[in-house]
Amino acid sequence: MDCLFCKIVDGSIPVSIVKQTEKVTAFNDISPQAPTHVLIIPNQHFENMGRVAEADPELAGEILKVTSAIAKDLGLESWRINANTGASAGQSVFHAHIHLMGGRTFAWPPG
Ligand code: 5GP
Ligand code: ZN
């Protein structure tokens, strides 16, 4: 399967790694939308975060745990997570990921 994020996990596409565990990889987004913009992904391929939650809730929890730990490590007091699910919600890479963003204010509702 030709998946960009699988190639990031196996190291064939270089990224700025923030944290990597046996099951999860976190790296800086190439096109940051905030001063902090990290993507947290499962090392195993799933199409989106909904699929991860259905197939492996423990892994979904691990992804959130790593996300929260990174926010803490980076000293973020306020942060936003986003899991775009489906093209019309803005998903462009169909390997599950959470966006962690911080360092600026965010509008609510997001529009
Ligand atoms: P989505 O639109 O699917 O929710 O988010 C995909 C994210 O992946 C985008 O924010 C985009 O900037 C990021 N991205 C796409 N290609 C690359 C890449 O090659 N390296 C990195 N670090 N991020 C990427
Ligand atoms: Zn993949």
Image (spheres, rainbow, N blue to C red):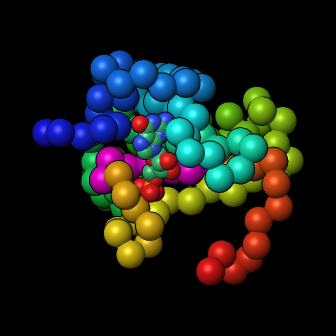
Q: Quadrant of residue 91?
A: bottom left
Above or below: residue 87 compared with residue 97:
below
Q: Going by the picture, which residue comes out furthest to the front?
A: 31
Q: How many marks?
A: 0
Would you say 44 lies left or right of 90 here? left
Tell me if residue 57 is in the magenta stretch: no
Residue 110: % across, % down: 66, 75
Residue occupying image coordinates x 32% and y 47%: 95
Q: Locate the C terminus and report the quarter of the image it occupies.
A: bottom right
Would you say 52 lies left or right of 89 here? left
Residue 45: % across, % down: 27, 41
Judging depth in this view, the residue of 83 and 31 nearest the camera is: 31
Tell me if residue 98 is in the magenta stretch: yes
Above or below: residue 47 compared with residue 111:
above
* Residue 10 seen in render: yes
Q: Locate the N terminus and report the quarter of the image it occupies.
A: top left
Residue occupying image coordinates x 62% and y 56%: 81
* Residue 61 seen in render: no
Would you say 74 lies left or right of 67 here? right
Q: The magenta stretch spans which residues?
A: 94-100
Residue 39: % across, % down: 53, 42
Residue occupying image coordinates x 35% and y 68%: 86
Residue occupying image coordinates x 29% and y 29%: 7
Q: Quadrant of residue 51?
A: bottom left
Residue 49: % across, % down: 40, 56
Would you say 24 lies left or right of 17 here? left
Judging depth in this view, the residue of 3 and 43 nearest the camera is: 3
